[in-house]
Image (spheres, helix red, strand yellow):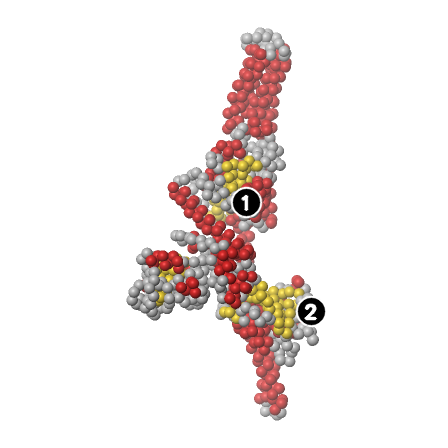
Amino acid sequence: MLDEGRRRAARGTDVVVAAVECHGRPHTEAMLDGLETLRAPDRVRPATTTGAGSRPGPAPDTGLRLGPAPDTGLDLDAILRRRPEVVLVDELAHANPPGSRHAQRWQDVQELLAAGIDVVATLNIQHLESLTDVVVKITGVPQHDTVPDDVVRRAGQIELVDVPPESLRRRMAHGNIYPPEKIDAALANYFRPGNLTALRELALFWTADRVDEALRRYRSEKGIDGVWETRERIVVALTGGPEGETLIRRAARIAARSARGGALLAVHVVRSDGLAAGASHAALARQRRLVESVGGSYHSVVGDDVPTALVEFASAENATQLVLGTSRRRRLERFLTGRGIGETTVALSADIDVHMVTHERAGHGRLLPYRRRTLPVSRRVAGPVAGLLLPVLLTLLLDGARGHLDLTSEALLFLLTVVGVACIGGVASALIAALTASLLLNYWFVPPIGAFSLGDADNVLALGVFAVVAGTVAAAADRSLRLSRRAARATAEAETLSSLAGDIVRGDQAIPALLARTRETFAMDSAELVEQPVDDPDAVHVPVGSDLFLLLRGRTLPSSERRVLSAFVAHVAAAVERSRLAEAAAEVEPVKAADRMRTALLAAVSHDLRTPLAAGWAAVGSLRSPDVEFTPEEQDELLATADESMARLSRLVDNLLDMSRLQAGALTLHLRATTLEEVLPAALDSLPPDGPAPVIHTPEDLPPVLADPPLLERVLANLLANAVRHSPPGHPVLVTASALGGRIEVRVVDRGPGLPPADRERIFEPFQRLGDTDNTTGVGLGLALSRGLTEAMDSTLTTEDTPGGGLTMVVSLPCADAT
């Protein structure tokens, strides 16, 4: 960033350093020489150095100076008054100090950009919002300050500063990054070779995606449809059949073998002719999870023609390879229906490579019908043509073999031809074939040959029987095909409804998912819930309850599909009702919680607060009584009783107030670097002086934690008091601390009776004393308050079994230097 600033300043650009984090690195500080740098409002120091971008004489009174910049937030007002051409802003994800105009530095940058000032900024890959969960898995260190990805993607230019892990570790070992006392710890923890390699790969892939977005935008603007093989993109086509998992794994292996790291995209084409025959929604759901588990993405598109939709999707995604399964149709089905999806896709693919992957279901499927028509167009055209041509071809063959067959055999061969035509084109084609065959058989093979006449009654009967049998067989074949298609459609509908019902029972379908499922199942462009019908003659409106309508756009929905749609609507209505009930329950729950709190608070006030109040009141009343004279020792004892009662009462009231602040979200936090040596002594002082002292084992080199010291003291004091109360005599409470993965874990160990696992979370509920028979020590808020205060500091409080018996409370706090 400073290099770029110096280059621009040398070219005459007005450059100002608004924020820079030098961290005491001399090489970084040296690069600030000659650059105008923000320090504080209304304070300026004249330029004392001459370098790239420096200007002679004193600078104007704008709050800018020359030299190293302080580690503070941006002074937006000073920058806006100064209005330079370019501002340098380090650490884009940095959190601003309290009282700043914006909470985050990237928000300051957005204001500068809106004012027309260019900004050059820096950002570590781990601070991108979309990558925080991945970074935590890699490094074990959570990132609290992040920048939304879209903020970074809107940058006019992104430059990746790629440093190999070995080079970065050498720079660190030479003292160019951290002071000597921190080098060994850094190299052994966050800056391990594996961590740096993984973070480097994240940065490379994220930047590659940004370049890919720019490439797609350029291709779209220029109308470029051809595939540019800049990166392997493998599209795998899923039908919802049993072969899907085989195809996904094969495509994933192809993507993994790509030298530049291939992207895997799975696509399912929803046909616009209704419920997709052979597509199992349950199988598609499993395959979608498999695609996502291997790092791919799942897509669903609607298309009238599956091969065209596949090729258009692949071209739009700039895919280089397309993976399809070989046909599940048998050879006869392929012969009858012609070229399938795979062959058509290959013909349309142009410069996209197509992989036809065999699988165990290849050739073992069955042809399923279209919804609207009994036969496709190709077969409805081929049937009549075959009805005319096949009898003619058979006549030519039999004429050449005249004398070898009798009339009965010749009639049977013509009958077989008619049956074949019926299988291809249905009854109408069979009638054409029967008429043609009858005429040819009469003219060429029934005496007198060469004339349309019948001289023998047996021949007349044979031809009549032939025509009846041909028509009957053709009708039976056509009916069989129709019933087969109806059965296939009924099976598809039943499977769709069964899968939908199963998802509903498992609770997998929320309202948006149900709407998406409805849109895909019925091949619609959109599906949404509206409060009243829209004025659109092409839209389908279906009532959902009494005040909502399901609005479908995309095509006219035939009556044959409305029965299935009604089942979807019923599920949508049930989901809407569940959502409303959940909202109502959520609204009632705070009222119920407040009522429980009031009831518990009244019980606590009526008993637990009354006990110390009564004891203190009695002690003070006795001292003020004129009827009794007390010795000095008795007066001291009564005063001590009153003081102890008031102290107990004060603690109870403080706990009640803090719990109410926590529940109202009004607790004020002041997080800072805090050492355990700072808070542990005060927590120990809160324990009764006559009790056994806890044993403390904490390392001397333990790093500070990020916490609010008074609140952390309260947490430890409550945990210590609880542990002391439950520890048997002769077994003091043990306090240990250790560092693990950028966090500090403090353990408070007792040797008491312990708790069964089922009660581990109940002890953190307010106004209860689980297993505590002493009802004079509080209102049951200590552990509940400790859990709430801990979570408010972005920490955790959990329980563990103490080896040998007892309970261990574990407080996990973030390290201050890890944030």
Are discs 2 and 1 less than 8 Å apart at CB? no
Q: Nearer the viewer, residue 534 or 422?
A: 422
* Residue 659 vertical placement versus 421 (above, below): below
In the displayed image of the protein, which residue is found farthest to the front? 174
CA–CA distance between discs 2 and 1?
Answer: 55 Å
Q: Residue at x 60, y 20 (%)?
A: 416
Q: Residue at x 49, y 50 (%)?
A: 205
Question: What kind of element bears circle 2?
Answer: loop
How many residues crowd mark 2 within 10 Å: few (<14), some (14–19), many (20+)?
few
Question: What kind of element bears circle 1?
Answer: helix
Is residue 86 left or right of 722 when viewed as pictured?
left
The amino acid beneath tag 2 is Pro
Of the two numbered discs 2 and 1 on the same chain, state the one appearing first in sequence: 1
Q: Which residue corresponds to mark 2? A: 753
Quadrant in which residue 397 is drawn: top right
Q: Which mark is residue 145?
A: none
Q: Which mark is residue 256?
A: 1
* Residue 530 vertical placement versus 269 (above, below): below
Residue 641: x %, y % from top left: 61, 83
* Residue 512 vertical placement versus 225 (above, below): below
In the displayed image of the protein, which residue is found farthest to the left? 57
Quadrant in which residue 243 is drawn: top right
Residue 318: x %, y % from top left: 46, 41
Is residue 632 left or right of 381 when viewed as pictured?
right
Q: Nearer the viewer, residue 94 or 104?
A: 94
Q: Residue at x 64, y 80 (%)?
A: 690
Q: Residue at x 61, y 22 (%)?
A: 473
Residue 467: x %, y % from top left: 59, 17
The amino acid beneath tag 1 is Ala
